[in-house]
Image (cartoon, helix red, strand yellow):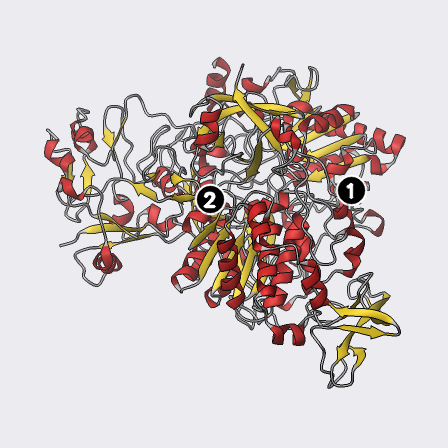
C-alpha cells in the first residue's frame, strides 16, 4: 500500500486522475490497485463541488432508464430517475443505483494488460495503450494477410460497448456474428403468420387494460424488465386476468392471477392441447377465420401444398421482382375453386373438394386432422398440467380479447422453441385474438414504444460496409474459419453453450483480445485485455445518442474515464489509427453524435445536441399521434395473401406447416440419460443481473450470492442440505457453486440465475454443462437456430465427493 | 399536527429491492448494512415460496423502521437519543447515542443496525445526499424516513424510486392524503399486538 499512499501525496486534483500505466508491473488478477489507490482523495479541498449530469442505463435489459446522476468532488454519488412528466419513463432499479459502487469496484479492469503466462493462467503485465494498439494492429494485419479479412472475428456485447455503433468490423471486413442464437426462437415461429418479425408486438403493454386475458408464456418481466411492472399491475387493477406459464414459481408467477407450472420444454404441447380442445368444442371464431385468415385456403390433401397461382410481385425489402402464390378457396356459391380474394365469393371453411382430379381440403380441416392426437389427456401427460386446467385456460383465452406475451427465455432455450411461437400464432388466428384492440402476440416488454425514429449514421466508404457473418458464434466455435478474434464483453460465455468446446476454440486462435469493463469470465483466456469505461464515463461531452421509449436519449459525460479505461469508440479508433485507418472515424463523440442526429425524419425535428443538453438528456420525439397505445394493428398484413397465415407451406419439408409436437433434445422425461442425469437445468435472468453484468457489484452481492436452486424434495433425495457447496455436472463438464433450497423450483429440475464471473464460482463456469446441439430446422428460419441452453440434464452432488 | 407515513401495497411490491438500494445510496449506508430490507414472508430465503410445489404462494415484505406512534425503541433509550419529532418521525440524535443497543433489543421489527466498527464503504468515499449526517462507529442507525428529503418537501428515496409504485408517502393526519385513503381502504400493520402503532402500514 506504500505506492498508494505515495500516489495520494502526489495527486491533489479533485477530478479523477488517469495515470500512465505502470509499465512492466506484473498484475495478477487479484493484485490490482484499489480504487482509493488510483483516485485522488475525494475531499481534498474545502467546499464540495456538486453537479448533475444525465444519461440512460443499461440497454441490455432494454429498459433504457433515463438517469439523473449527481457528481460530488468528481465522484458519482447519486443515481435517480430523471424527472419526467410522463411517469412511465421515470424509472430506475437497484442495478442502476448500484452503479455508484459498481463502477469503482474491484472487478473493474484498470489497465491494458498483456498475457505473460499460459492462456488461462490469469498472469498479465500492464502495458500502455500505445503498446496495446500496436499489438492488436500487428496481429490483425497478420491474420488478414495470411487468411483474409473473414478470418477475423470482432463481436460486441451490449454491456461493454457504449453508445456509438461500432465501426471496426466494417472497416476491416471482419466477421461480426450475423446470427444471434438466443431470444428469437419464438419469433422464428410466430412472425410469418402475421407478416412481422415475430419479436416485439405491434401494439403495446399499455393496451393490456383492454384485454380480458394476458397469457404470459415463460416471461418473468417483473424481475427482468422492472420498468414495465407498472403497466402489468395497472392492467390487473383494470380487471385484466394475467395467466403465467412457467415451470418455476417466478416473481411474475407469484403476482399473476393464475400460475400454470408446466414441465420445462413442453409449452408447444400445452398450446396444441388447447388448440385441439377449442376445435373439438367449436370455440374458434369462424367469422374471423373466414374473413381474415388462411384457414379457408385449399391445400393438397396428400402433399399439403397450397392450391394457388403464381403472381408477379415486388419484394418490399429489396425492391426486386418476385413471385407470390395467390391461394384458392372453395366458393360455396359457385361450387368452384376461386382466388381467395374473388369479390362475392363465399369461401368454405370446411370440406374436401376435387379440383382438376386432385383432392383438396381446407387448411381448417387439415388442422383438425393434424391435431387429432393432441387430446387434453395427451397434453396433461406431456406437460404435467391437469387437463381441466388446460381446458380452462383455452376457454378463457378463446373468449378474448386476449394477448399472448412471450419473453425471450424459457422455451427459447429449448430445441423446439419455434414450435411454441408457431402455436401462439395458430391459436390467435383461430380465435380472433390478433389484429383487434386487446389482442396480440409478441414481446411486450424490453420494448420501445411504437414510435421509432430513423436516425442518421456515420458514413463509411462503400468498400467499408458491414459484412455480416452468415454464421453465429455458436457455429464458428465448431470451425477453423477464424484465426484472430476480438470481443467487447464476454461473448464466448454468452453466445455459445458447452464451455469446453468454446475454450478449445479460443485456444486454437492465433490471437484473441478482450475489451471489457469488468473482469468477466473470459479475461483469463485471452492474450490481451483492454479496460472499457462504464456508460457513466466518457472522454467527450457526449458518449452516444439513441432512440428508445419514444425519446432521443443522450449519454452525457457523467465522469471522465476511470482508471486507465477508454470507451469502445476510442478503443476502436486507436486500433484503426495503428492500422493507418483512423481517418475513417469521426474526430470525437460530438462529431459522431451530430452525424446520428442528422436525419430528415420529421419526428426528430429540432432534436440537436444543444436541445438534448437543454432538456437534460432526453427529447421526446415529435409526433402528431398518441404513442401510448397507437393505431389498432388491424386485419391487413405483410403476408402474401395479406391475411393471417398460420399455415407455413415453406416448412412442409420439416413437417411443421402447422405446428407439430417435437420433444426437447435432451431434457425429456423418457430420455435414458435421465438415469445418469435426472435433473433438467434452467438458467435465466434475475433482478440481480443483466446476464453476467453486476456479478462484481458489491451492493448487489449484499443481496444475492450465486447459487443453484433445488426443490427441497430433490435435495433430500441426494442427502443435500441448504448451503452445501455442490458440484453440478454432466458428460460435458461441471461447475461448483452453493446450493439453496427453494419450493418455487419444479421437482426434477434445477435453477440458477445466469450468469456469474468464474471468480465467484470457484474458477468454474456454469456454461460447462449446457447443451450446444443446434436444431437444423432453425437454419431455415429468419433468425437461425437457438442455443438450447436449458435443454440440459445434470446431476448434483456435494463438492469433493 | 403532522404524522408522516408510508403505505406499501404488497401486491404492487415485486420484490425488486430497489427500495433497499435507493435507501442505501441516499443515506450513505455503509457496507454490510441496510436500513430497508425486503423479506419473503413465511420463509427464510429471499424468493423462496410458501407451500409444496405447485401449491405455492409468495409475498414480498419490505421492512424498515415503522416510525411507530408508540415507539418501543424510544422508551428504552437511556439518553433520549431516539425521539419522536414534530412530523411524527422516529429519529436518532447521533451525538447523544452511547451505543448501548437497548433500542435494537426493544425494536420488534429488527429495523436498526449498529456500527460495530469504523464504517467502511467499498466506494472509498461518501455517497448520497450531502445533507445526511455521517454516523461514527458505535452508534445505532435506521431509516429516518429520509428526514433530509422530507424536510425539503420531497418524498423518501424508496418511494421516489419504486418501480412498481408500491409505496405511497404522506400525512396520516390529513384525511384527504393518499396514505389516509389507503389506510381507510384496509391498511394493516406488522405485529399489531405489540401496541407500537406503526406509521408504516401495508395494503394487500
Is residue A597 visible in the rendered structure shown here?
yes
Residue at horizontal 79%, vertical 58%?
A: A650
Q: Nearer the viewer, residue A549 or A209?
A: A209
Q: Secondary structure at mark 2?
A: loop
Q: Quadrant of residue A648?
A: bottom right
Residue at horizontal 63%, vertical 41%?
A: A161
Q: Secondary structure at mark 1?
A: loop
Q: Nearer the viewer, residue A271 or A526?
A: A271
Q: Nearer the viewer, residue A692 or A143?
A: A692
Which callout, 2 or 1, points at the residue further toward the start of the chain?
2
Point out the image quarter for the C terminus of chain A. Answer: top right
Badge 2 crowding class, 10 Å Cα cut-off, few under 14, some 14 to 19, many 20 or more, is many
Instruction: Using residue A51 as the reference point, say whether residue A18 is left or right of it.
Output: right
Question: Which residue is disc 2 drawn over?
Answer: A250
Instruction: Using residue B196 as the reference point, say whether residue B128 is left or right of it.
Output: right
Question: Which residue is disc 1 drawn over?
Answer: A471
User: Which chain is mark 1 on?
Assistant: A
Vertical order, B161 against A193 (above or below): above
Q: Quadrant of residue A29?
A: top right
Q: Position of residue A420 (x, y in %)?
A: 63, 52
Amino acid at each position: 500500500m506504500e505506492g498508494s499512499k505515495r500516489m495520494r501525496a502526489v495527486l491533489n486534483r479533485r477530478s479523477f486522475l488517469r495515470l500512465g500505466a505502470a509499465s512492466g508491473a506484473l498484475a495478477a488478477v487479484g493484485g490490482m490497485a484499489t480504487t482509493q489507490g488510483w483516485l485522488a482523495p475525494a475531499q481534498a479541498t474545502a467546499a464540495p463541488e456538486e453537479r448533475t449530469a444525465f444519461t440512460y442505463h443499461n440497454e441490455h435489459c432494454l429498459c433504457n432508464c433515463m438517469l439523473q446522476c449527481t457528481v460530488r468532488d468528481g465522484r458519482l454519488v447519486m443515481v435517480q430517475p430523471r424527472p419526467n412528466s410522463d411517469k412511465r419513463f421515470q424509472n430506475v432499479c437497484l442495478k442502476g443505483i448500484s452503479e455508484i459502487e459498481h463502477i469503482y469496484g474491484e472487478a473493474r479492469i484498470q489497465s491494458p494488460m498483456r498475457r505473460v503466462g499460459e492462456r488461462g493462467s490469469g498472469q498479465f503485465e500492464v502495458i500502455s495503450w500505445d503498446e496495446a494498439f500496436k499489438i492488436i494492429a500487428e496481429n490483425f494485419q497478420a491474420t488478414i494477410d495470411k487468411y483474409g479479412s473473414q478470418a477475423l472475428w470482432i463481436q460486441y456485447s451490449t454491456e461493454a460497448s457504449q453508445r456509438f455503433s461500432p465501426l471496426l468490423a466494417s472497416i476491416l471486413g471482419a466477421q461480426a456474428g450475423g446470427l444471434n442464437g438466443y431470444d428469437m426462437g419464438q419469433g422464428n415461429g410466430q412472425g410469418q403468420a402475421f407478416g412481422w418479425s415475430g419479436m416485439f408486438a405491434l401494439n403495446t403493454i399499455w393496451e393490456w387494460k383492454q384485454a380480458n386475458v394476458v397469457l404470459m408464456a415463460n416471461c418473468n418481466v417483473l424481475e427482468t424488465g422492472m420498468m414495465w411492472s407498472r403497466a402489468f399491475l395497472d392492467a390487473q387493477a383494470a380487471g385484466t386476468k394475467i395467466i403465467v406459464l412457467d415451470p418455476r414459481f417466478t416473481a411474475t408467477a407469484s403476482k399473476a392471477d393464475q400460475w400454470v407450472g408446466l414441465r420445462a420444454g413442453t409449452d408447444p404441447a400445452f398450446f396444441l392441447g388447447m388448440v385441439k380442445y377449442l376445435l373439438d368444442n367449436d370455440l374458434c371464431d369462424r367469422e374471423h377465420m373466414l374473413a381474415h385468415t388462411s384457414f379457408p385456403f385449399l391445400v393438397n390433401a396428400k402433399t399439403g401444398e397450397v392450391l394457388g397461382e403464381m403472381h408477379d410481385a415486388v419484394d418490399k425489402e429489396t425492391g426486386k421482382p418476385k413471385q407470390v402464390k395467390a391461394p384458392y378457396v372453395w366458393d360455396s356459391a359457385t361450387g368452384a375453386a376461386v382466388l381467395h380474394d374473388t369479390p362475392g365469393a363465399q369461401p368454405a371453411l370446411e370440406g374436401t373438394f376435387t379440383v382438376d382430379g386432385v383432392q383438396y381440403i381446407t387448411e381448417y380441416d387439415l388442422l383438425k386432422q393434424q391435431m387429432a392426437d393432441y387430446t387434453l389427456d395427451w397434453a396433461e401427460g406431456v406437460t404435467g398440467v391437469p387437463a381441466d386446467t388446460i381446458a380452462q385456460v383455452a376457454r378463457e383465452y378463446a373468449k378474448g380479447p386476449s394477448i399472448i406475451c412471450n419473453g425471450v427465455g424459457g422455451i427459447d432455450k429449448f430445441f423446439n422453441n419455434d414450435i411454441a411461437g408457431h402455436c401462439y400464432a395458430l391459436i390467435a388466428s383461430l380465435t380472433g385474438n390478433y389484429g383487434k384492440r386487446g389482442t396480440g402476440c409478441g414481446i411486450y416488454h424490453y420494448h420501445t414504444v411504437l414510435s421509432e425514429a430513423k436516425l442518421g449514421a456515420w458514413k463509411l466508404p462503400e468498400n467499408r460496409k458491414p459484412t455480416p457473418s452468415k454464421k453465429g458464434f455458436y457455429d464458428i466455435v465448431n470451425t477453423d474459419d477464424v484465426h484472430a478474434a476480438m470481443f467487447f464483453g464476454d461473448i464466448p460465455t454468452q453466445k455459445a453453450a458447452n464451455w469446453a468446446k468454446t475454450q478449445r476454440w479460443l485456444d486454437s486462435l492465433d490471437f484473441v483480445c478482450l475489451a471489457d469493463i469488468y473482469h468477466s469470465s473470459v479475461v483469463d483466456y485471452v492474450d490481451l485485455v483492454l479496460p472499457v469505461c462504464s456508460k457513466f464515463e466518457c472522454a467527450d461531452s457526449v458518449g452516444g445518442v439513441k432512440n428508445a421509449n419514444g425519446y432521443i436519449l443522450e449519454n452525457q459525460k457523467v465522469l471522465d474515464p476511470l482508471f486507465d479505461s477508454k470507451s469502445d469508440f476510442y478503443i476502436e479508433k486507436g486500433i484503426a489509427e495503428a492500422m493507418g485507418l483512423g481517418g475513417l472515424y469521426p474526430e470525437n463523440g460530438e462529431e459522431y453524435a451530430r452525424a446520428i442526429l442528422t436525419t430528415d425524419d420529421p419526428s426528430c425535428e429540432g432534436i440537436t445536441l444543444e436541445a438534448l443538453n437543454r432538456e437534460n438528456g432526453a427529447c421526446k420525439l415529435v409526433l402528431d399521434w398518441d404513442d401510448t397505445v397507437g393505431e389498432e394493428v388491424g386485419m391487413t398484413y405483410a403476408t402474401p395473401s395479406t391475411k393471417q397465415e398460420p399455415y407455413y407451406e415453406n416448412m412442409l419439408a420439416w413437417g411443421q406447416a402447422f405446428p407439430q409436437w417435437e420433444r426437447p433434445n435432451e431434457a425429456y422425461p423418457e430420455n435414458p440419460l435421465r438415469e445418469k442425469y435426472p435433473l433438467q437445468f434452467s438458467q435465466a435472468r434475475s433482478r440481480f443481473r443483466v446476464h453476467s453484468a453486476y456479478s462484481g457489484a458489491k451492493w448487489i452481492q449484499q443481496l444475492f450470492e450465486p447459487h443453484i436452486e433445488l426443490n427441497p424434495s430433490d435435495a433430500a433425495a441426494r442427502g443435500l442440505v441448504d448451503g452445501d457447496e455442490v458440484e453440478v455436472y454432466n458428460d460435458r463438464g461441471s461447475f461448483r457453486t452453493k446450493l439453496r433450497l427453494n419450493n418455487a423450483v419444479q421437482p426434477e429440475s434445477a435453477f440458477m440465475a445466469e450468469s456469474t464471473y468464474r471468480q465467484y464460482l470457484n474458477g468454474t463456469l456454469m456454461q460447462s454443462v449446457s447443451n450446444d446441439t443446434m436444431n437444423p430446422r432453425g437454419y431455415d428460419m429468419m433468425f437461425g437456430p437457438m442455443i438450447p441452453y436449458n435443454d440440459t440434464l445434470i446431476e448434483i452432488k456435494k463438492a469433493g465427493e | 399536527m403532522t404524522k408522516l407515513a408510508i403505505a406499501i401495497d404488497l401486491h404492487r411490491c415485486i420484490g425488486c429491492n430497489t427500495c433497499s438500494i435507493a435507501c442505501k445510496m441516499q443515506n450513505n449506508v455503509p457496507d454490510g448494512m441496510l436500513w430497508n430490507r425486503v423479506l419473503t414472508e413465511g420463509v427464510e430465503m429471499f424468493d423462496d415460496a410458501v407451500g409444496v410445489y405447485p401449491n405455492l404462494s409468495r409475498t414480498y415484505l419490505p421492512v424498515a423502521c415503522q416510525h411507530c406512534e408508540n415507539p418501543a425503541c424510544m422508551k428504552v433509550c437511556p439518553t433520549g437519543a431516539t425521539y419522536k419529532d414534530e412530523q411524527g418521525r422516529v429519529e436518532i440524535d447521533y451525538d447523544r447515542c452511547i451505543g448501548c443497543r437497548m433500542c435494537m433489543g426493544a425494536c420488534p421489527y429488527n429495523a436498526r443496525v449498529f456500527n460495530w466498527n469504523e464504517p467502511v464503504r467499498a466506494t472509498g468515499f461518501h455517497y448520497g445526499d450531502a445533507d445526511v449526517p455521517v454516523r461514527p462507529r458505535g452508534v445505532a442507525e435506521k431509516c429516518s424516513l429520509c428526514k433530509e428529503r422530507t424536510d425539503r418537501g420531497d418524498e423518501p428515496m424508496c418511494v421516489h424510486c419504486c418501480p412498481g409504485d408500491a409505496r405511497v408517502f404522506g400525512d396520516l393526519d390529513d384525511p384527504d392524503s393518499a396514505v389516509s385513503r389507503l389506510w381507510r381502504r384496509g391498511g394493516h400493520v406488522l405485529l399489531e399486538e405489540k401496541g407500537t402503532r406503526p406509521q408504516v402500514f401495508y395494503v394487500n
